[in-house]
């Protein structure tokens, strides 16, 4: 029997926004290599907050966050995490900041130390994979919401992460594009991911198991 490789291990984590009730109170969560899970739960239950804690965008009040078998506490601890885990934000406008689509997609690989030729090849492959050929010189700001969402996925995909955290990735996408996203996710056998979504059909088609987040806990359903 193959031993599970823990990618993310959260132990007794507590978190609250200022002047609000705690979202998590000594919450535990494990995520292993090869898992593809859906995360559901009421609005405000902490799904997006969990992603932000994993990426070091928020800090817990107490508890332990271990990612790739190392405890992550300080800002510098999360540099490696952000290179190996790709977060697709719920709002694509939080992800896109370059003038053109090509520049936005190229930013990640260049930031990871790829040279311009390597980045050019990654850009081409990413555009082809996500059906975005012809978008290279489009002004990001002028894209439709659905197009922005697809490009935001492309910016993360180009970094070739080991883990994807997808926060409501198919909102405002048409049926054909949703099917394309499903195909992309299922075709990469080495990818582990967590998807937040209210779309049960999408989760059924892309994940192996579904977890419910409610009252500060994560429970497999």
Image (spheres, grey):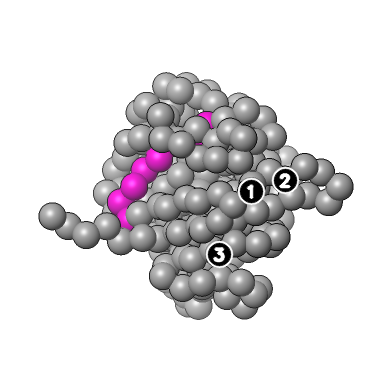
- Mark 3 vs mark 2, CA separation in Å: 16 Å
Main SS class of the magenta portion in the image: strand
Q: State left or right for residue 118 relative to residue 71.
A: left
Residue 35 counted in the magenta span: yes
Q: Secondary structure at mark 3?
A: strand
Q: Are marks 3 and 1 in contact (CB under 8 Å)?
A: no
Front position among marks 3 and 1: 1
Q: Which residue is pictured at 17% across the width and 57% down the height?
A: 2
Could you say whether the residue bearing mark 2 is in a helix, strand or loop? loop
Does dot 1 land on a helix, a strand or a loop? Answer: strand
- Measured in 3D between alpha carbons, the distance from the residue under mark 3 to the one under mark 1, in whole angstroms, is 12 Å
Query: Left or right: where does residue 164 sit relative to residue 5?
Result: right
Residue 25 percent location from the top left of the image: 64, 48
Disc 1: which residue: 25
| Image quarter of residue 54 | bottom right
Residue pushed farthest right?
19
- The total number of labels drawn is 3
């Amino acid at each position: 029997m193959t031993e599970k490789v823990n990618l993310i291990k959260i132990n007794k984590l507590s978190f609250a926004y200022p002047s609000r009730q705690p979202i998590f109170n000594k919450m535990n969560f494990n995520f292993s290599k090869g898992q593809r899970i859906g995360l559901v739960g009421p609005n405000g239950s902490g799904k997006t907050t969990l992603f932000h804690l994993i990426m070091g965008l928020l800090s817990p009040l107490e508890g332990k966050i271990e990612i790739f078998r190392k405890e992550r506490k300080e800002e510098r601890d999360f540099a490696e995490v952000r290179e190996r885990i790709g977060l697709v934000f719920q709002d694509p406008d939080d992800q896109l900041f370059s003038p053109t689509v090509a520049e936005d997609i190229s930013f990640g690989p260049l930031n990871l130390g790829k040279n311009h030729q390597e980045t050019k090849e990654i850009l081409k492959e990413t555009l082809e994979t996500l059906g975005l050929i012809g978008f290279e010189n489009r002004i990001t700001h002028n894209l439709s919401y659905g197009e922005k969402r697809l490009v935001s996925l492309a910016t993360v995909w180009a970094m070739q992460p080991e883990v994807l955290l997808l926060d409501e990735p198919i909102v405002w996408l048409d049926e054909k594009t949703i099917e394309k996203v499903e195909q992309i996710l299922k075709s990469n056998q080495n990818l582990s991911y967590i998807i937040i979504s209210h779309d049960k059909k999408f989760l059924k088609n892309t994940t192996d198991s579904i977890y419910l987040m409610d009252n500060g806990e994560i429970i497999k359903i």
